Image (tube, rainbow, N blue to C red):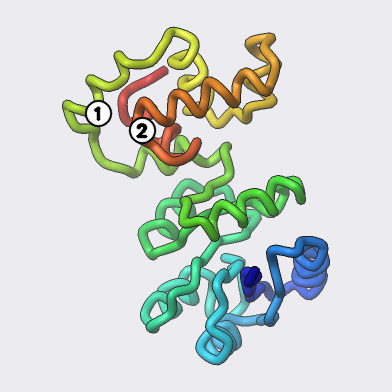
């Protein structure tokens, strides 16, 4: 099987080294390059055509958003995930509008980061759960048909959806509702199927737009 070829873009060598070492433990990923600036990222991306680019926002010179826009201006099929310390609503929304395929905070647990990157390679939008309300507020109004489908959920599924919309993880929801985490996962899968959504992030965005509280 082919592996996902990753380019890491960050002006902090220690961070690049840490992420590279993490990915080297995973057979699904291969780090094909590191860039310490936006300009170097553009050159490496054009030369190597990576499948996935991890991009920091706060870099000297050309910042992450400028680099993101420049990358999207080229004929690249790379998935681009913002990996940053910034949890600013403005940064989240602007990055997604500029074409990012995900927005993940650097304090994410290593196992969770790997999981999110794998989801990103499958075509899913990945966003740190604490940031989903900000993203949801930036999106448009729901259609009448979408609102009607909320009635298809069970009371428990609506309760879980409400907590997902608040940025809660499965583990946190399980603890709050005093239910096994595996049971929460079953409810989430059922809920996503009924709503025609592909991920928790989409569910959180959808729920906030529905006015679910």
**Dot 2, how many residues are within 10 Å of its Cα: few (below 14), some (14-19), or many (20+)?**
many
Which SS class for mark 1?
Answer: helix
Q: Earlier in the sequence, mark 1 or mark 2?
A: 1
What is the x, y in percent for residue 81? 55, 62
Which SS class for mark 2?
Answer: helix
Label total for image:
2
Judged left or right of residue 143, residue 84 is right
Q: Name the residue rendered at 69%, 26% in the picture.
A: 171
Give yes or no for contact between labels 1 and 2 (Cβ–Cβ under 8 Å): yes
Q: Please determine whether, in this image, residue 184 is positioned above or below residue 41.
A: above
Judged left or right of residue 6, residue 39 is left
**Which image quadrant: the N terminus?**
bottom right
**Dot 1, how many residues are within 10 Å of its Cα: few (below 14), some (14-19), or many (20+)?**
some
> What separation in Å lies between label 1 and label 2 (alpha carbons)?
9 Å
Q: Hey, which quadrant is residue 77 in on the image?
A: bottom left
1 vs 2, front mark: 1
Q: Name the residue rendered at 53%, 47% in the picture.
A: 127
Q: Name the residue rendered at 56%, 61% in the picture.
A: 82
Q: Hey, which quadrant is residue 100 in on the image?
A: bottom left
Q: Name the residue rendered at 47%, 16% in the picture.
A: 157
Task: Please tell me which residue lies in front, 90 or 55.
Answer: 55
Q: Please determine whether, in this image, residue 68 is positioned above or below residue 173.
A: below
Judged left or right of residue 3, residue 203 is left
State the residue position of label 2.
206
Task: Please tell me which residue lies in front, 58 or 96.
Answer: 96
What is the x, y in percent for residue 13? 79, 75
- Tell me, yes or no, if residue 9 can be seen here: no
Which disc, if any, is residue 146? 1
Q: Hey, which quadrant is residue 96 in on the image?
A: bottom left
**Which image quadrant: the C terminus?**
top left
Task: Please tell me which residue lies in front, 33 or 105.
Answer: 33
Judged left or right of residue 34, residue 79 is left
């Amino acid at each position: 099987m082919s592996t996902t070829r990753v380019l890491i873009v960050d002006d902090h060598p220690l961070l690049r080294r840490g992420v590279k070492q993490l990915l080297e433990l995973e057979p699904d990923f291969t780090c094909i390059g590191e860039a310490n600036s936006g300009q170097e990222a553009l050159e490496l991306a054009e030369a190597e055509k990576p499948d996935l680019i991890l991009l920091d926002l706060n870099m000297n010179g050309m910042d992450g958003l400028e680099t993101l826009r420049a990358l999207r201006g080229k004929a690249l099929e790379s998935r681009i995930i913002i990996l940053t310390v910034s949890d600013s609503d403005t940064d989240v929304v602007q990055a997604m509008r500029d074409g990012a395929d995900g927005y993940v905070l650097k304090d994410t647990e290593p196992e969770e980061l790997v999981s999110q990157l794998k989801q990103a390679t499958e075509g899913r939008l990945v966003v740190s759960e604490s940031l989903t309300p900000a993203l949801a507020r930036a999106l448009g109004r729901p259609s009448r048909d979408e609102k009607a489908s909320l009635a298809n959920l069970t009371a428990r599924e609506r309760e879980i959806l409400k907590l997902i919309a608040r940025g809660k993880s499965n583990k946190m929801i399980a603890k709050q509702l005093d239910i096994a985490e595996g049971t929460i996962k079953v409810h989430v899968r059922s809920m996503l199927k009924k709503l025609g959504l592909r991920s928790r992030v989409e569910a959180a965005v959808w729920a906030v737009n529905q006015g679910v509280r």
